[in-house]
Image (cartoon, grey):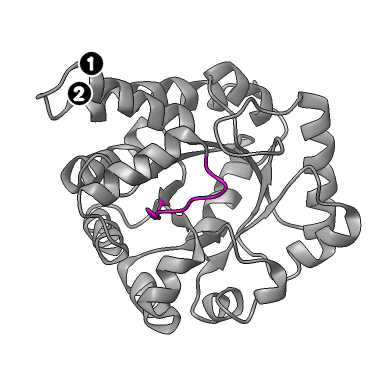
Amino acid sequence: MSRIAERFKALNAENRAAFVPFIMAGDPDYDRSLALLKMLPAAGADMIELGVAFTDPMADGPAIQAAGLRALKGGQTLKKTLSLVRDFRVDDAQTPIILMGYYNPFYAYGADQFLKDAKSAGVDGLIVVDLPPEEDEELCLPARRAGLDFIRLATPTTDDSRLVRVVKNTSGFVYYVSVAGVTGKGAGGRDVVNAAVARIKQASGLPVGVGFGIKTPQKAAEFAGFADAVVVGSALVDELARSLDGKPGKADNSVNAVLALAEDISGAIRTARQ
C-alpha cells in the first residue's frame, strides 16, 4: 500500500478529510522552501503538494505563476526539487509528497530517469496538468509501474463519458477542480461540488480531493464535510508573497506566515465533521 493510500485509510478511520497544502519548490529560495516543507506536517498537513516551477503554467493563476517565477529566478530546477524531497525525507518518512507540475520539465529530464530519481528521493505521487489520458503511455503508466501514484484532475466540464477515461489509470486519489478556470479563482458552490465529488467517487472507487479557489479556513471546512481531501495553494502562496513584501530581511517571516495560515486551515478541516 502506498503512503498516500495508507494516509487516506488512517484519515477515514478518524472520519476527517486530509489537509493538502500546496507550496512551490524553491519559493522564495531553496532554504526557506525546505524549512517550510519540513514544518508543514507539524502545522497539520496530511499530505503535501510540491509545485515544480515552469515558465508557462497554463492552469495557474497569478499567485502561483509568481511563485514559480520567484523559484526559477532563484535557480530552482527539477533536480533541486528532488533534492528538497530527499532532504525532507531525512526526518519524515510518513508524510506523502506529491509533485504537481507540467510535462515539459519531466520530459526534458528524461521520463525514465526522472521516475527512477523521484522514487529514490521519496516522491509518492504525480499530478501532471497537461498530460491527458490519451497520453498515458508517456508518463502515467510508467509511473504506476515505478510505484508512484498518478493523480488526475477532473473538472466541472468532465462529463460521465470523459470521466471514465480520466479515472481509468488514476491512482492515489482524484483531484476535483472546484471551479472552471485557473487556480486562485473563487471556489465552486457547496451543493454542486458535493454532487461532483459523489459522482467521481462512484466512477473511480478512489478518494476525491477538492482544490482551486479555497482561500479561507471556513471554505476549507465546508468542503471537508464531504470531500476526502482539501487542497489549498494560492492562499498559502499569497501569504508567503505578502510576508516577503512586508518585512524584508527577516528570513523566517515568510515561513512563519504560511505556517500560521496552514494551522488555521488545518484546524478548521479537523473539526468540520464534528
Q: Quadrant of the N terminus?
A: bottom right
Q: x%, y% of residue 265?
A: 48, 24
Question: What is the magenta segment's predominant secondary structure?
Answer: loop
Please tell me the numbered disc located at residue 253: 2
Q: Residue furthest right?
A: 161
* Image vertical order of residue 137 relative to residue 254, above or below: below
Disc 2 secondary structure class: helix
Tags 1 and 2 in contact by the CB under 8 Å rule?
Answer: yes
**Left-right relation of 262 to 194:** left
Measuring from the top left, give residue 17's x and y in whole percent. 60, 36
Residue 56 within the segment the image draws in magenta: yes
Give the residue at x 63% y 25%.
Answer: 186
Q: What residue is drawn where x is 67% and y is 22%?
A: 222
Q: Position of residue 149 (x, y in %)?
A: 55, 66
Label 1: few (<14), some (14–19) or many (≥20) C-alpha neighbours in 10 Å = few
Q: Residue at x 70, y 36 (%)?
A: 178
- What's the residue at 82%, 26% (across, down)? 191
- Residue 168 visible in the shown view: yes
**Amino acid type at mark 1:** Gly
**Residue 5, quarter of picture:** bottom right
Q: Secondary structure at mark 1?
A: helix
Mark 1 or mark 2, which has the lower sequence index?
1
Which residues fall within the magenta stretch?
51-60
| Residue corresponding to mark 1 | 246
- Callout 2 amino acid: Asn
Q: Which mark is residue 81?
A: none
Residue 1 in view in this figure = no
* Relative side of 156 to 273, left or right: right
